[in-house]
Amino acid sequence: MLRNSLIVIVSLLAAQAYAGTETQNWTFNGSNISGNGNGNSINLASGDVTLTITGWSNTGRYNTLETGTLGYDNGYGLTLKNRDEGTWSPDHSIDSFYNSNVDAILLEFNKAVNLDHLGIGWATDGSGGGSGAVDISIAAYTGSNADYTNFYNTNTNTWGELLSNGWKGVNTVNNNSDDDFLDMEDYTYHAIDTGTVTSKYWLVSAYNPLFGDYSSYAGSENDGFKLTGLSSEYTKKEEQEKPPGIPEPSTIAMFAFGLFSLVRMRKEKHISL
């Protein structure tokens, strides 16, 4: 009886200490998009994790950030038309063509996640004709503002000012290799290395030297791509809400200690007889 009780208690302790990792696979299509025009969004859910996507570019006065219009090009992926562009190719891709504008999509999760894959559809790193590869940049919000409002203060924020407000290019974190973000081939689901960074807020953009300057390898501007999907990983922490009826770990430990003591006392008593 005592042995069985100990097994149950040890199992409960292990369950409390366990931190499980869940993978979310996000795919895009035309029906995902909510609303029309600048500031429209995509809203998705996978288990306990939700994702909202909006499009941004530095099209405002003095290069401040403004929302763009998300779209979907059937068979090619998610698109973004900033406020200075038309609807034709390559303007409607997530790109860095014309006027030094750099487009990006903002990924807002309700949980802190790690990005580990990107699906690249149509891509170019040249004149826009679809060269079959693209250079991209990825940044994560690593600041301490839990409510996080500074990105939407478009009266002051430029891409550079975001770096003073808690954002950081992931290729500059932990001496991360840049190779994952260079010459990403089209129509491929790419594994990417974002290190150990987890965040609720991520930016995926055409190559932006402010998020990590590797221009000697990436070349000039004129990168563009369409995104078919991505995947993230969420690690459940110990501080998550426990199921009803399961005691606190400290309480379980006290019971375990008591039962172990009883077992020892019984063994010592048996030996003395």
Image (cartoon, rainbow, N blue to C red):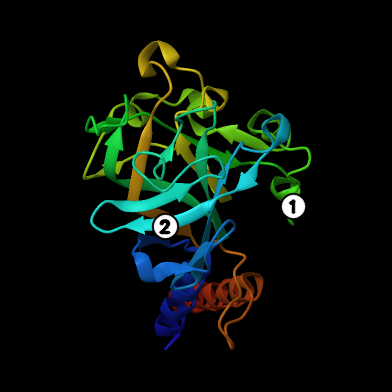
- Which residue is pictured at 64% across the width and 37% down the height? 167
Camera sees residue 51:
no
With respect to residue 171, does 244 lie above or below?
below
Q: Secondary structure at mark 2?
A: strand
Q: Position of residue 202 (x, y in %)?
A: 54, 46
Residue at point 70%, 42% (across, down):
143
Relative to 254, residue 54 above or below: above
Residue flagged by tag 1: what amino acid is it?
Thr
**Rendering coords of residue 185 (x, y %):** 23, 35
The residue positioned 68% from the left and 38% from the top of the image is 60
Q: Position of residue 65 (x, y in %)?
A: 66, 41
Tag 1 residue: 149
Whether residue 215 can be seen here: yes
Residue mark closest to the camera, 2 vs 1: 2
**Closer to us: 188 or 22:** 188
Amino acid residing under circle 2: Gly
Q: Which mark is residue 71?
A: 2
* Residue farthest to the top, as pictured: 216
Instruction: Determine whether, in the image, residue 217 is placed left or right of residue 13.
Output: left
Who comes first in sequence, dot 2 or dot 1? 2
Q: Quadrant of the N terminus?
A: bottom left
Q: Is residue 105 left or right of residue 242?
A: left
